[in-house]
Structures are given as C-alpha cells and as structure tokens.
Image: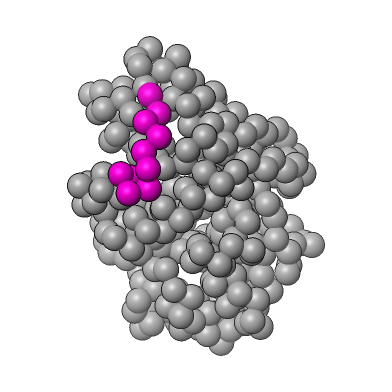
C-alpha cells in the first residue's frame, strides 16, 4: 500500500478539494486539523491528524510514514522563517515531494509571502512542485462573500485590472495529478482559467445569475484597508491582500496559460459556471 499524503489546510477552500481528489484516486490521505472541531469537517475517508505550524510537537506524528505533502500557507503566516521548522521536519521524515500552493508570478514577486516560502523549499533537500494559481474564484464565496451577499458590492482595490480567475476545484485536480503521477519534481506550473476578466465583468455575471444588482466599487487601497479593518481583519492580512490586488491593478494578473488544461486534460471551469454553482450563496438570506 502506498504511503499516505499529508494535506495541510485540509478543511480549507483548496485543501478540502485536494483531499477529495486524492481519495477519488484511491490514495491514503492524512488531513491536518488544529482541533476537534476542524477535525470533524475532514472529508469522509481521510485520517484526521492534529497539526499546527506553530507547534513543532505536532510535526512528527503528522509526518509519520508520509512521503508527499500538500502545503498550504496559513493566511496569518507571512514570513518564510515561520515555515523553517516544518521544512526541517519534512526533511528528517524523508518526505520526497512537497507540493506548495503558491501564487501566480510569486517566483518573481518578492512582495508576496509565497516568494520567500518558495525559496526556502528550493533550498531544502525535498523535491518540490510549485502550483502557482491565479486568483481563486472562491475568494468571492469566502473573504468577499458578506459584501456581495449583504451589500451587493465587490469591494477590492483592483482598479481596471483583469484577472485570469481559476476555480479551486481545478487547482485541486492539478494537485492530485502532480502528487500521484511521475515527472513533476522541481517544476512550477502557472495555473489560470481560460479567460481574464475585470471585476466589473464579474459583478455583471453575478447580477445576471442571481437576478439582483451587484456592482464593483473600485476602492483605493486605503479605502479597502479601512473597510477590511471595519470587518475586523488583521492588519497583516490586509497588507498582504493590498499587495496582491496591486498586482492586479498593475495588469500583472491577466495572463492566461494552458498549463492547467495540459495537467488535468480538460477545459477549466468558467466563471459563469462557478457563479451558477454558487448562486444561492450570493443571494441574501
């Protein structure tokens, strides 16, 4: 029987989909959880294991017999130094591949924390695979959902920039491929959807699908920061988000590649399909 795959962030937007994709491929999956409540959300079929990036005492048990790791950066961890203890633990455990959920263009963008984490992994003795997706469509059903659902507004400081949005389900499908098939070590993949859209176009599509007016407000970076602070997001998280949306505003998030289609063997999920699949979430209760 093959060694288990450790999936960090296993109850999150991408991690939960990765767990399901791996289980569909008959892989043994060990899914991380910080407490009993999060463990209860682990997809059926996976083994839940207590794990905390900030508690090294949880590393060895989580990594026991593991040979592959899907690594997700927790939003509150913005320095590569915070990952060094876990990288060392993976080396000692004999992990042969770590697949890191990075960000489109992170390899050449030192502003985003993913850049430094990539460098740290490349310096390690572990075989690495960088998945560098564009913006998740699911950002609109998580971080920005209350603004859309309750106020009918998309509030992000992206200007007129366009984004090659990708569905988290497609990222997970790509992750399952590189974790279970040979030929992907020490390689990075730029993963995007099949089209680049402005947030005004996204708002228009959501309006059509939900039957209610949804608008894109185009706030400045400072206006966005004030708004997110009013929603009680931590300053460090807001700073990272401003940096990421600045990339969009400057026109650097609009590139469209065919690397996702090559990996998964089908067309990416479109934004319109994503909107239809999640229409009820965008409507007020």
If the image is split into quadrants, where does the C terminus sit? Answer: top left
Relative to residue 220, is residue 217 depicted above or below?
A: above
Relative to residue 205, is residue 26 depicted above or below?
A: below
Q: How is the image coloured?
A: one colour
What residue is rendered at 52% in x and 44% in y? 249
Residue 256 shows up from this direction: yes
Start and end of the magenta stretch?
A: 215-224
> Is residue 223 found inside the magenta-colored segment of the image?
yes
Residue 143 shows up from this direction: no
Q: How many marks?
A: 0
Task: Identify which residue, 88 or 213, lies in the foreground.
Answer: 213
Location of residue 263 in the rendering, given as x and y in whole percent from the top left corner = 73, 47
Q: Residue furthest bottom?
A: 92
What residue is rendered at 79% in x and 62% in y? 183
What residue is rendered at 26% in x and 27% in y? 151
43 relative to 25 in the view: left or right: left
Task: Identify which residue, 188 or 26, lies in the foreground.
Answer: 188
Location of residue 149 in the rendering, given as x and y in whole percent from the top left corner = 30, 28
Location of residue 175 in the rendering, given as x and y in whole percent from the top left corner = 62, 53
Location of residue 259 in the rendering, given as x and y in whole percent from the top left corner = 74, 46
Relative to residue 67, is residue 158 depicted above or below?
A: above
Q: Residue furthest right?
A: 183
> Is residue 235 found inside the magenta-colored segment of the image?
no
Task: Identify which residue, 29 or 170, lies in the foreground.
Answer: 170
Task: Identify which residue, 48 or 195, lies in the foreground.
Answer: 195
What residue is rendered at 70% in x and 55% in y? 189
If the image is split into quadrants, where does the N terminus sit? Answer: bottom right
């Amino acid at each position: 029987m093959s060694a288990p795959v450790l999936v960090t962030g296993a109850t999150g937007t991408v991690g939960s989909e990765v767990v399901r994709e791996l289980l569909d491929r008959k892989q043994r999956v060990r899914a991380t959880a910080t407490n009993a409540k999060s463990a209860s959300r682990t997809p059926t079929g996976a083994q839940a294991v207590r794990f905390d990036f900030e508690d090294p005492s949880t590393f060895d048990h989580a990594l026991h017999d593991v040979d592959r790791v899907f690594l997700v950066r927790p939003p509150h961890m913005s320095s590569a130094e915070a990952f060094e203890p876990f990288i060392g633990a993976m080396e000692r455990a004999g992990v042969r591949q770590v697949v890191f959920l990075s960000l489109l263009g992170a390899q050449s963008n030192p502003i985003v924390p993913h850049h430094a984490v990539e460098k740290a992994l490349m310096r390690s003795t572990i075989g690495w695979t960088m998945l560098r997706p564009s913006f998740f469509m699911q950002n609109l059903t998580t971080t920005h959902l209350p603004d859309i659902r309750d106020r009918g507004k998309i509030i992000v400081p992206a200007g007129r920039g366009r984004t090659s949005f990708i569905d988290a389900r497609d990222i997970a499908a790509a992750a399952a491929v590189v974790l279970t098939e040979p030929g992907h070590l020490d390689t990075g993949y730029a993963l995007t959807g099949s089209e680049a859209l402005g947030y005004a176009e996204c708002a228009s599509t959501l309006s059509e699908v939900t039957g209610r007016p949804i608008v894109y407000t185009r706030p400045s970076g400072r206006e966005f920061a004030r708004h997110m602070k009013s929603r009680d997001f931590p300053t460090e998280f807001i700073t990272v988000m401003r940096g990421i949306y600045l990339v969009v505003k400057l026109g650097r998030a609009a590139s469209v590649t065919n690397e996702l289609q090559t990996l998964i063997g089908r067309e990416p999920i479109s934004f319109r399909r994503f909107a239809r699949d999640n229409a009820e979430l965008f409507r007020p209760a």
